[in-house]
Amino acid sequence: MPTTIAAWRAALEAGDAEAAGGCLAENAVFISPLTEKFRFHGREQITEVLRSAVEVFDDVRYHTEVGEGSTYALFFHCRVGAQAVEEAQLIRLDDAGLIGELTFFGRPLPALTETMLALGPRMLRRQGQPGLGRLIGFAVRPLAAMTRFGERRLVPLGDPNRRRRIDG
């Protein structure tokens, strides 16, 4: 495993955004699982995202790593509040062995909406836009509530392993 990948994993498991940021190339790009509308560019901007992320994600524990050369996929479990999260990270290293590109993917859907609810407003406050942060929180809160409800009450009804009552 390259030194950068080991350092990245250790930093995020320890909740150390600064150490994780040190694994990034100066011109790194971060592709978020929460929006396709923009990307985060550069070590400084991505480290700012990481500062918010380590405040939101608890108990980060990597469980799988695959890759070779300059491309790796890392997978971890964590929590956002009471919601279990599993995240996948596609990492591409640059010629210097630093992280040049990060693409994150997350599951299940309620975890993504909880992440958006916890992370978006926090990041916007850090950017000096607390009013927009409140607006985003207000807009996302119903979506997060609907996905939580659906996951708890509706989705189990479609479980193919659920015992069905057979009427005679």
Image (tube, rainbow, N blue to C red):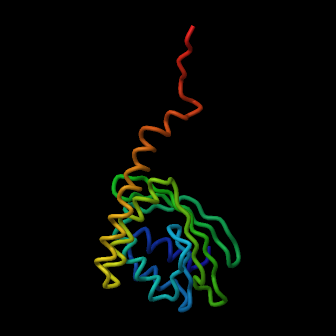
From the viewer's perspective, is 60 left or right of 90? left
| Res 137 → quadrant | bottom left
x and y, in percent, of residue 19 in the image: 43, 81
Q: Residue at x 58, y 66 (%)?
A: 74
Q: Position of residue 60 (x, y in %)?
A: 43, 63
Q: Is residue 142 above or below residue 135?
A: above
Q: In this rendering, would 128 be left or right of 113?
A: left
Front residue of 104/122: it is 122
Viewer-side residue, 66 vs 35: 35
Q: Quadrant of the C terminus?
A: top right
The correct choice, above or below, for 58 with respect to 101 in the image is above
Percent from the top left, x then y, of residue 144?
39, 55
Relative vertical location of residue 75 with respect to residue 127 in this rendering, above or below: above
- The image quarter containing residue 79 is bottom left
Res 161 quadrant in image: top right
Q: Quadrant of the N terminus?
A: bottom right
The image position of residue 125, as x and y in percent, is 31, 79
Q: Residue most toward the right?
A: 69
93 and 168: which is toward the camera: 168
Query: Which residue is rendered at x = 47% and y = 86% of the image?
Result: 22
| Residue at the spot 35% in from the left edge and 84% down from the top edge | 127
